[in-house]
Image (cartoon, rainbow, N blue to C red):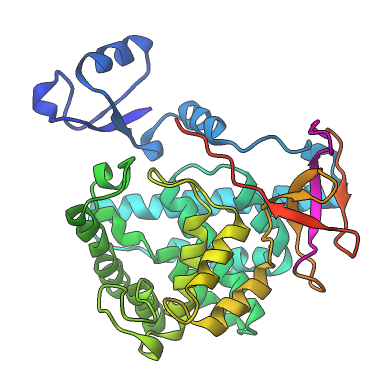
């Protein structure tokens, strides 16, 4: 793993201040003599180490996907490759922006149509993968996840292709300005203090500035990036604008970005289930979030979004794997445990219908490194 920062000044240690890669157990022993904890940069870590991190954060096992029908397996593998390529492209763009202070949008733009096509054709598969499979790089995963939910939402709103394209691009660029935030702050395992929060909030202006420097970014995308943290009641940032003064795309972005953030493990908070994240949005309807848009987002992803772990009335449990367009409260469920709590090895999917009675959504498992 690549050590990017220490819990103390580099001057008080024998280590190189530019960071270093841990490759031997002896290095960890030396680190322990000087530090209680360190900050790891997954993007610069060895591939095997990144896989180890992913395994540590993985959710409880689900039935072997190799048992899926060939058509479903091909669909999942195709979407998985697309997500891997998109993550890699976002990571490369972020690294280049960090080095050069400029945003090269062309590589992302070149793959945008294929990305949107996969979401439009296989929305359930794309949501399943980002909900159940670990992804290297928290910020990259957040960008891709927010973009997927934005397109799913936009499609439900009846947006055309050009609008979906702007929505997806804006979602991918929301946090590009965090390249200017020190990794010590981004990786802090506790809640940020007021000074640190103020520093992080500068990422919005930085994101907008980077987007504006690129001639390939439309004005409404720039506005979306620059105002996605504004809130209906004026308590957002950086401009404290309110109501319909917040651009329409930014009101969409505020909802999907919040939803995706709440369903991810953060250093100071456990991930919520998709169902719990929707309840949070609904609690703040007409206060922080546009009530009509919250309603439409719930229709788009269902009351129990894909990937949500649920318990059924008979005591069995599983994960929501497919939305039921006819009944948001009765999605298709991939069973993982029988009523006695024993793991189910074979693929068994319960079709959403009158007999699908969900008792409750289960908390998302939390794994700490």
Magenta segment: does it hold 297? no
Query: Which quadrant is home to the C terminus?
Result: top left
**Which of the 4 image quadrants contains residue 170?**
bottom left
Q: Could you tell me which residue is drawn at 59 percent across and 71 percent down?
A: 151
Which residue is most to the left?
11
> How many numbered marks are there?
0
Residue 215 visible in the current orientation: no
Q: Position of residue 76 (x, y in %)?
A: 73, 50
Residue 181 left/right relative to 51:
left
Is 291 located above or below residue 136 in the figure? Answer: below
Which residue is most to the right?
355
State the extent of the magenta-drawn residues as a range.
Answer: 329-344
- Closest to the observer, 318 or 172: 318
Q: Could you tell me which residue is drawn at 23 percent across and 22 percent down?
A: 35
Is 146 located above or below residue 92 in the figure? Answer: below
Q: Position of residue 199 (x, y in %)?
A: 20, 57
Is 166 located above or below residue 180 in the figure? Answer: below
Most common SS among magenta residues: loop
Residue 48 left/right relative to 91:
right
Is 12 located above or below residue 322 in the figure? Answer: above
- Closest to the observer, 189 or 95: 189
- Closest to the observer, 278 or 255: 278
Q: Position of residue 286 (x, y in %)?
A: 47, 82
Magenta segment: does it hold 330? yes
Q: Could you tell me which residue is drawn at 42 percent across and 76 percent down?
A: 288
């Amino acid at each position: 793993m690549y050590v990017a920062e220490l819990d103390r000044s580099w001057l008080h240690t024998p280590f190189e201040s530019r960071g270093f890669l841990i490759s031997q157990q002896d290095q960890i022993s030396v680190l322990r003599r000087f530090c209680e904890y360190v900050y790891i940069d997954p993007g610069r870590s060895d591939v095997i180490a990144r896989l180890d991190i992913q395994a540590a954060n993985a959710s409880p096992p689900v039935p072997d996907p190799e048992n899926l029908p060939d058509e479903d397996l091909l669909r999942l593998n195709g979407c998985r490759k697309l997500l891997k390529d998109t993550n890699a492209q976002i990571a490369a763009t972020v690294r280049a922006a960090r080095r050069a202070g400029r945003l090269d949008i062309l590589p992302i733009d070149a793959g945008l149509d294929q990305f949107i096509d996969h979401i439009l054709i296989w929305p359930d598969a794309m949501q399943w993968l980002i909900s159940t499979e670990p992804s290297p790089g928290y910020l990259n995963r957040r960008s891709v996840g927010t973009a997927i939910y934005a397109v799913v939402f936009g499609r439900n709103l009846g947006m055309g292709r050009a609008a979906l394209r702007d929505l997806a691009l804006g979602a991918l660029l929301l946090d590009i300005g965090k390249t200017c935030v020190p990794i010590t702050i981004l990786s802090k395992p506790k809640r940020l203090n007021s000074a640190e929060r103020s520093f992080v909030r500068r990422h919005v202006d930085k994101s907008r500035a980077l987007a504006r420097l690129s001639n390939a970014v439309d004005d409404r995308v720039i506005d979306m990036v620059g105002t996605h943290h504004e809130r209906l009641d004026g308590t957002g940032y950086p401009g404290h604008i309110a109501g319909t003064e917040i651009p329409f795309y930014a009101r969409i972005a505020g909802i999907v970005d919040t939803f995706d953030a709440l369903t991810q493990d953060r250093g100071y908070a456990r991930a919520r289930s998709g169902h719990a994240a929707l309840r949070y949005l609904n609690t703040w309807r007409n206060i922080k979030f546009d009530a009509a848009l919250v309603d439409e987002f719930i229709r788009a992803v269902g009351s129990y979004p894909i990937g949500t772990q649920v318990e059924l009335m008979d005591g069995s449990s599983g994960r929501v794997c497919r939305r039921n367009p006819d009944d948001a409260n009765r999605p298709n469920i991939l069973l993982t445990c029988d009523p006695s709590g024993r793991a189910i090895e074979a693929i068994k999917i319960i079709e959403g219908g009158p007999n699908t009675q969900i008792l409750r959504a289960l908390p998302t498992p939390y794994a700490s490194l």
